[in-house]
Amino acid sequence: NAGVTQTPKFRILKIGQSMTLQCTQDMNHNYMYWYRQDPGMGLKLIYYSVGAGITDKGEVPNGYNVSRSTTEDFPLRLELAAPSQTSVYFCASSYMGLSYNSPLHFGNGTRLTVT
Amino acid sequence: QQPVQSPQAVILREGEDAVINCSSSKALYSVHWYRQKHGEAPVFLMILLKGGEQKGHEKISASFNEKKQQSSLYLTASQLSYSGTYFCGTGFETGGSASKIIFGSGTRLSIRP
C-alpha cells in the first residue's frame, strides 16, 4: 500500500517558469490537501478538495492552481514561479471529514527551490 | 484563524514532563496533533473531536476543551524519541462540511540525555 505519493522529490526552477507538483493516493480518500512549509515554520494550507470536481482555497492560494478530476489525483500547478515560493510542499489526504476520527496521511514532500 | 501554540520551544532532560498548548479564537470542530522530525513528513498522533474529550497514546495524552477553544498535549516521562516539532491542527466547518484543517506554527521539543 503506497499511501500518498508525491513527485518529484526535488526541483529547482528559474524565476518565471511553471511546473506541476503531482500527488496521488491509493486509499480511496475523498479529502485531499496541499500545504507548504517554509524553513523552520509551520504548515500553511494552499488548497484543499472534498471530492472529485470540488476544490477550495486555503490560507495562501495566490500563485497556485489545483484541479481534482479523479479521486486519486490532486496536482498543484505553479505559474510564473517566484523566489517566495521556495518551500517544501506536502500533499495529504484523509478518508472522512472532521466529524470523524480521520487523520491526515502525508506524502513525503517536494522540496522546491526557485532561483 | 491560525491556532496559537505555546511554548514555541521546550528543552527537557530525558524523563521530564512537558505540556504543549493550542488555542483558537474561532470555534473548533476538532483538534489534530502531529509530530514532525527534521526533514520528514508530519506523523499523526491523535485527534480530539468536539464534545470535550481526553485521549491517551502511550505516554502522550491530550485534552480538548471546546468551551475555551483550547487543547493541550501532555508528554510524560519524555524519551529521546519524543524530540521533534509538534503541531496542532484545528478543524473548521466550512459551508456545512467540516473539511479545512489549519495548523499552528509548531512547538520545537528537544530532549537531552
Image (tube, coloured by chain):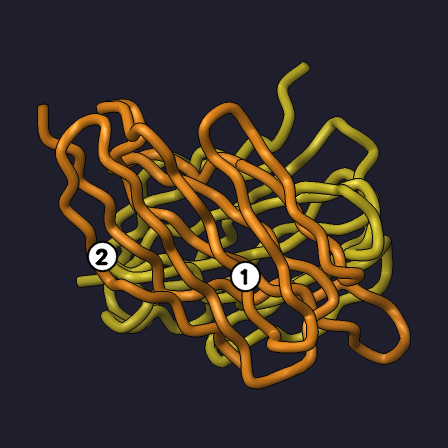
Chain colours: A yellow, B orange
B75 relative position to A92: left or right: left
> Taking A32 as reference, is A38 above or below it?
below
Image point (86%, 61%), residue name: A53
* Above or below, A1 relative to B1: above
Mark 2 belongs to which subunit? A
Q: Residue at x 29, y 23 (%)?
A: B81
Crowd tier of the residue under label 1, counting other residues whose Cα lies within 10 Å: few below 14, some 14–19, many 20 or above: many
Q: Chain of mark 1?
A: B
Quadrant assignment for the C terminus of chain A: bottom left
- Around disc 2, counting alpha carbons within 10 Å, would you say few (fewer than 14), some (14 to 19), or many (20 or more)? few
Report the residue marked by disc 2. Answer: A39
For the residues bearing labels 1 and 2, Cβ distance under 8 angstroms? no
Residue furthest out toward the left? B113
Residue type indicated by callout 1? Ser
Which image quarter: residue A98?
Answer: bottom right
Position in image of residue A11 (x %, y %): 31, 44
**Relative height, residue A28 to residue B19 (above, below):** above
Q: Are marks 1 and 2 on the same chain?
A: no
Residue that appears at 23% across and 70% down: A83
Q: Which numbered circle lies on residue B46?
A: none
Which disc, if any, is residue B71?
A: 1
Amino acid marked by disc 2: Pro
The image quadrant where one finds the N terminus of chain A is top right
Picture coordinates of residue A4 (x, y %)? 61, 32
Residue B103 higher or lower than B92, as above or below: above
Q: Is residue A58 left or right of residue B76?
A: right
Q: Residue at x 19, y 51 (%)?
A: B10
Snapshot quadrant of residue A57? bottom right
Residue B69 percent across, percent down from the top left = 61, 74
Foreground: A94 or A60?
A: A94
Quadrant location of residue B107?
Answer: bottom left
Q: Residue furthest right?
A: B96
